[in-house]
Image (cartoon, helix red, strand yellow):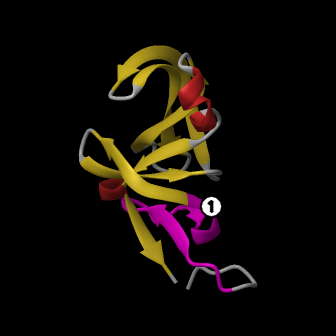
Amino acid sequence: MAEDAGGDPLYSCKNCRNPLAFRSDLLSKAFLAKSGQAYMFSHVMNAMLGKKEDKQLITGLFTISKTYCSKCGEELGWMYVKAYDPKQMFKQGRFIIEKAKIVKQY
């Protein structure tokens, strides 16, 4: 199965099983996206970013880039590029991935 040397579980694309993030990159499970629950990750691999766009989200105005699986092109969520509210700056550079689009592998 997909594991690194330390046995860290992987989150992979539900559609094609492309590895996207390690469990150690998971910061929070308390986010919402189009399909419902979403996770915040500090780092995502094997993903492509779309063009930057300003978007009004629940917690304020952000510049985001949609995030896609590099293998199958599935839209996974977004990356926070810029936060306009100083209280939301901690999100900059972080990724929101929809729970419905990923699977945990051991």
Q: Is residue 33 left or right of residue 73?
A: left
Q: Residue at x 55, y 28 (%)?
A: 87
Q: Residue at x 42, y 40 (%)?
A: 77
Magenta span contains residue 17: yes
Compared with 40, 7 (above or below) is below
Range of magenta residues:
7-26
Name the residue nearer the viewer: 87 or 43.
Answer: 87
Compared with 58, 101 (above or below) is below
On the image, the x and y values in percent for residue 96 come to 47, 44
Q: Residue furthest right?
A: 5
Name the residue nearer the viewer: 75 or 81.
Answer: 81
On the image, the x and y values in percent for residue 49 come to 57, 32
What residue sits right under mark 1 in the picture? 25
Name the residue nearer the viewer: 20 or 41.
Answer: 41
Instruction: Describe the element under mark 1 as helix, strand or loop.
Output: helix
On the image, the x and y values in percent for residue 11 come to 50, 66
The tally of labels here is: 1
Q: Residue at x 31, y 44 (%)?
A: 32
